[in-house]
Amino acid sequence: MEFDSLGEDYDFYNGYAITIGFGIQKHSSKKGSGDEGLVMKEFVCCKQRKKVDVNLNPIGKGDKAYARSDCRAKVALLKPNGHNKFVVPVFKEQNYHVASRG
């Protein structure tokens, strides 16, 4: 696949992720030398390696647990030298956590 801009890819991948049942976030990027601008960008599952403090007691005191997702869903974009479009060299559709629709 090819995309004219990062925004176009973000919208496409975000639509896919919502359909599957997860959110996405920007992960990493790489700028080119000179005035090339951005040459690489990754979008990943919003729960990737994120530690969340989950309170098991509704009053707010007592036992706590940590919920962590090892989700590996991601898409990477690369703008090869001399090209105006971003291509997708990496697409991982694994989504290991329980999807929430709300």
Image (cartoon, helix red, strand yellow):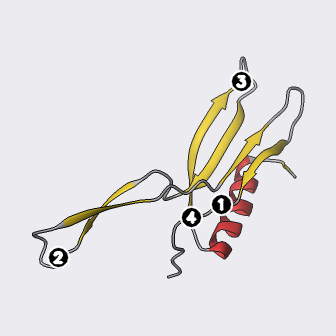
3 vs 2, front mark: 2
Residue 39: assigned label: none
Residue at (80, 35) in percent of width and height = 79
Q: Amino acid at mark 2?
A: Asn
Q: CA distance from mark 3 to mark 2?
A: 49 Å
Could you say whether the residue bearing mark 1 is in a helix, strand or loop? loop
Residues at discs 4 and 1 in contact (Cβ within 8 Å): yes
Q: Which mark is first along the chain, 3 or 4?
A: 3
Q: Which mark is first along the chain, 2 or 3?
A: 3
Q: CA distance from mark 4 to mark 3?
A: 33 Å
Q: CA distance from mark 4 to mark 1?
A: 6 Å
For label 1, the residue is 94
Q: Residues within 10 Å of mark 3 (few under 14, many from 20)?
A: few
Residues at discs 4 and 3 in contact (Cβ within 8 Å): no
Q: Which mark is first along the chain, 2 or 1?
A: 2
Q: CA distance from mark 3 to mark 1?
A: 29 Å
Residue 32: assigned label: 3
> In front here: 39 or 59?
59
